[in-house]
Image (tube, grey):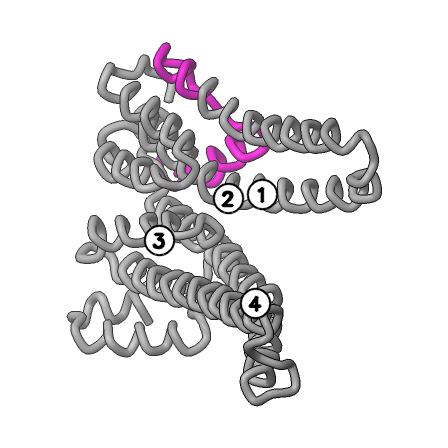
Amino acid sequence: MNNAPTTEERIWAMLSHLSALTFGMGILLPVIGWSEQRRKSNYASFQCLQALGYQSLGYTIWALFSTVAALIFVIVMLPTLNSANAPSVVDDFMTFILGLSSTYVLLPVIAAILCSLGKDFRYPIMGQRLASFLADESTEKSEEQRWLNENHEFQWVVAMGHFSILVILWGMLAPLTVWILYGKRSAFLKFQSIQTFVYQASVTILYFGFVFLFLLGIIIISLFALMGWTGDVRVDSSMGIVGIMFFGGSLVVLFIVVLLVPLLHILGQWAGFRILKGENYRYPLIGRLVEDRILKRTNSDLKEELV
């Protein structure tokens, strides 16, 4: 990565970093940039893989930290909401959230500026570790002549697809793009990207399905409450009992959302971690179903790679 990067290399690197400003929607751009520049430019490939890591793993860390910090802030400030200082507390909370968002977008902007100047940018903590992970020391070629380690490239791309499960909806673009671009070249990438996409799609449908049922229950119980307030329906009537049952069902659905969906997200993080450790991880049930379907349509050479 010592040679001065060309204009094309700098543009791909800059755009990949700037795509983080879309908060998830641009996660496919680093994958496309890596696919376009790999075996052409170590500089652009590395910067694209860095940008992908920041938008998946970095977004995960930022989202978790923001959620925990916001909860702590609300709990600490909750007793003051009924006081005369309530407006200032709300303003402080909004400033706090804005500050966290600004922290997330600051690094990609700095990265894009430095890459536009041809500098070899490294994200704190992740950048140097990723450079060491991708370095190919298996040949005697010089650093300028040596390509990035292909197996480690594939592991990183796949792992970031798993980590992107916290990027609601848009996170599915990462494994989907890998599937489209590299599904025919590598059974490992094909299997992992398909099972990741299917798993994330299933979790997303489950999440929005539960949210819809919860909101439906709230709407129904609100209608029953309104009818009871006007005297049309009594609480001890059959309609009132139905309303109470819907309310109880909504609470059960909310309980499932609060407990089950985070566990499914944690499983996605665990899958990404196992991939980085060199395993061909399979999700329970979904992994086996996807693998069996792929093996039926895969030639013998790719079957050996997959198994």
Image point (61%, 26%), residue name? 99
Q: In this view, does 55 lie above or below 88?
A: below
Q: Which of marks 3 and 4 is in front?
A: 4
Which residue matches tag 4? Answer: 226
Q: Distance between the residues labelled 3 and 2?
A: 14 Å
Q: What stretch is highlighted in magenta?
A: 111-139
Pointer 3 with pointer 2, Cβ within 8 A: no
Instruction: Residue at the far front: name it.
Output: 231
The numbered disc on residue 161 is none
Is residue 59 or residue 35 the one in the foreground?
Answer: 59
**Disc 3: which residue:** 172
- Circle nearer the viewer, 4 or 2: 4
Res. 137 visible in picture: no
Q: Which x, y percent locates residue 7?
A: 24, 15
Callout 2: SS: helix
- Comparing 154 with 90, the one in front is 90
Q: Are marks 3 and 4 in contact (CB under 8 Å)?
A: no
Residue at the spot of label 1: 61
Left/right placement of residue 271 relative to residue 84 reads left
Is the C-beta separation of discs 1 and 2 under 8 Å?
yes
Q: Which amino acid does label 2 sit on?
A: Leu
Counting residues from the start of the chain, the first of labels 3 and 4 encountered is 3
User: Residue 234 occupies which quadrant of the picture?
Assistant: bottom right
Q: What residue type is labelled 1?
A: Ile
Q: In x, y percent, where is residue 162?
A: 44, 55
Q: What element carries label 1?
A: helix
The Cα–Cα distance between marks 3 and 4, rounded to whole angstroms, is 41 Å
Assign a secondary structure to mark 4: helix
In magenta stretch: residue 221: no
Residue with the mark numbered 2: 57
